[in-house]
Image (cartoon, rainbow, N blue to C red):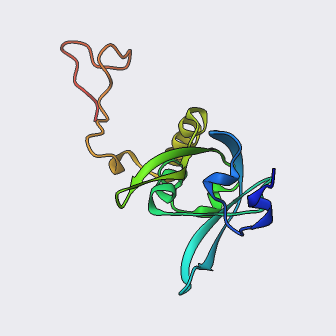
Amino acid sequence: MISWNKVFKSKYLKASHLDADVTTVQVKDVKEELVGQPPELKAVVYFIGMEEGLILNKTNATALRTPFGDNEQRWVGKTVQLHKRQEMFRGEVHVVIRIVIPEASKAGDAKRARTNSESDDDFPGFDDAPAPGDSDAPQDGEAAVV
């Protein structure tokens, strides 16, 4: 059987290039490139072991920016999953790639990002008061130290 993805090689990653419904990869690089006709400036993410880059749409860019931050160079080396999904677009079903961050990566990177670059004041509703039952919490009759 002819491998049409090899015959009609593309510079950019498509869902049809992925063999499995979920592919785990590591980010190798993120670049800005002129894509399409007429050319438009787009962000393209490259993965270790893959020649083709994935043109980032807003959904996939947000999937990377949320846990890893806006500085795309901090995404390099991060482990992500590429999920093939069927989604509606303009009334038609298309097979698309969605970037999903594995839970282990989310927890570790979100904690590091918060520790390194954000204060508690950046989180609406964050309360410095100790949780009930916390050994440092003031006991009845004690004044809270603020």
45 shown above or below 124: below
Point out residue 11 in the picture as x, y percentages from the top left corner: 71, 69
User: Residue sitting at 25 percent across and 27 percent down?
Assistant: 144
Of 34 and 16, nearer the camera is 16
Count all numbered tags in the image, as a single digit: 0
Looking at the image, residue 82 sits to the left or right of residue 3; the answer is: left
Residue at the left extreme of this rendering: 141
120 shown above or below 138: below
Indicate the quadrant where residue 129 lies.
Answer: top left
Of 83 and 31, nearer the camera is 83
User: Residue sitting at 78 percent across and 53 percent down?
Assistant: 48
User: Residue sitting at 53 percent across and 52 percent down?
Assistant: 96
Indicate the quadrant where residue 142 lies.
Answer: top left
134 shown above or below 145: above
User: Residue sitting at 29 percent across and 17 percent down?
Assistant: 132
Point out residue 123 in the picture as x, y percentages from the top left corner: 33, 46
Point out residue 58 in the picture as x, y percentages from the top left corner: 45, 62
Of 139 and 6, nearer the camera is 6
Of 39 and 145, nearer the camera is 39
Indicate the quadrant where residue 47 lies.
Answer: bottom right
Point out residue 78 in the picture as x, y percentages from the top left corner: 67, 48
Residue at the front extreme of this rendering: 1
Looking at the image, residue 90 sits to the left or right of residue 54; the answer is: left
- Quarter of the rendering occupied by the C terminus: top left
